[in-house]
Image (cartoon, rainbow, N blue to C red):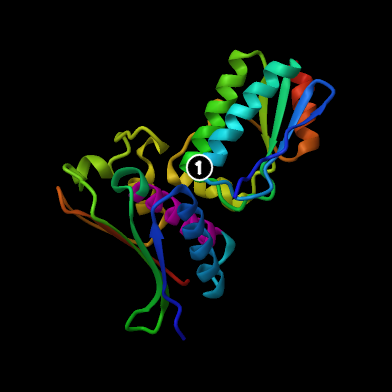
Amino acid sequence: MEIRVPILKIKNYLIVPIQVDLDDNAAARLQRDILIRIEQTGARGVIIDISVLDLVDSYLGRLLGDTAQMAELMDARVVLTGMQPPVALTLVELGLRLDNIYTALDMESGIELLESLL
Amino acid sequence: MERTRHISISNEHDIVLCRRSSRELARELGFNLVDQTRITTTASELARNIFEYAKKGEVIIGVIENHEGHLGLKMTFIDKGPGIDNLDAALGEGWTSHRGMGLGLPGSKKLMDEFNIESIVGKGTTVTVVKWQK
């Protein structure tokens, strides 16, 4: 069973809606796919939407933070959008810090944030 | 009512099954969304520890009742892996593993109401956690 997250290109941005609970392999593959798509398209901004995810554990949290840092090295900014309140609460209790990633409440404000950054 | 679930851990997808199973039982027991998330996140962290350090093991998720009639969700994570040499260090947040930044044990301790770990080097590790209904 192969789970593949779609990566959509709109203007200068990549939109990555994570709609299913990813296992660690699928999450790592998504990270690679995002970087490859940044290279292929020259996208300057990436929105990773997690509004339907009811869980972000330390592995996925760290992987998303790393992805943002890697994208930054390729001159693209990553915004994480739509984190549910219980997920935010649990991540902080768990002790995971996501210092290196931009966040926005929803995709629309994520796009606005990217426009202000670029 | 048989609510105990056994999940064998031997690949990445089993970690997903483990969090799904814990979510189902937490929901059945009427835990609120925040506690469901705490339980499911703990299940994910500790199941991954099994896979990462012992390659395989077993998770048992079930219901317990205390003497006051309060119900709780109990999860036990058992492996016959290498065991942990220095438990104090492993429970401290400075401890780093190559994945997940070593938050699994100290993080789970914070997310759950009860946390117990027994580990013997060369024999394996058993972690037991409980979340009580409010």
Image location (x, y in percent) of residue B105: 33, 48
A39 sits left or right of B50 in the view: right
Image quadrant where residue B101 sits? top left
Residue at 50% over, 65% down: B21
Considering the numbered disc 1 on the image, is that residue within a helix, a strand or a loop? helix
Assess whether residue B44 is covered by the magenta stretch: yes
Q: Nearer the viewer, residue B72 or B119?
A: B119
Q: Is residue B10 above or below residue A17?
A: below
Image location (x, y in percent) of residue A34: 65, 27
> How many numbered callouts?
1
Report the residue marked by disc 1.
A24
Q: Nearer the viewer, residue A84 or A27?
A: A27
Any part of residue B115 in sight: no
Residue at 56% over, 50% down: A55
Residue at 71% over, 27% down: A46
Any part of residue A36 in sight: yes
A113 sits left or right of B12 in the view: right
Image quadrant where residue B116 sits? bottom left
Q: Which residues are magenta?
A: B34-50
Residue at 38% over, 52% down: B46
Image location (x, y in percent) of residue B59: 37, 62
Assess whether residue B105 is covered by the magenta stretch: no
Q: Main secondary structure of the magenta part?
A: helix
> What amino acid is at disc 1?
Asp
Image location (x, y in percent) of residue A1: 59, 50
User: Residue farthest to the right?
Assistant: A11
Chain holding disc 1: A
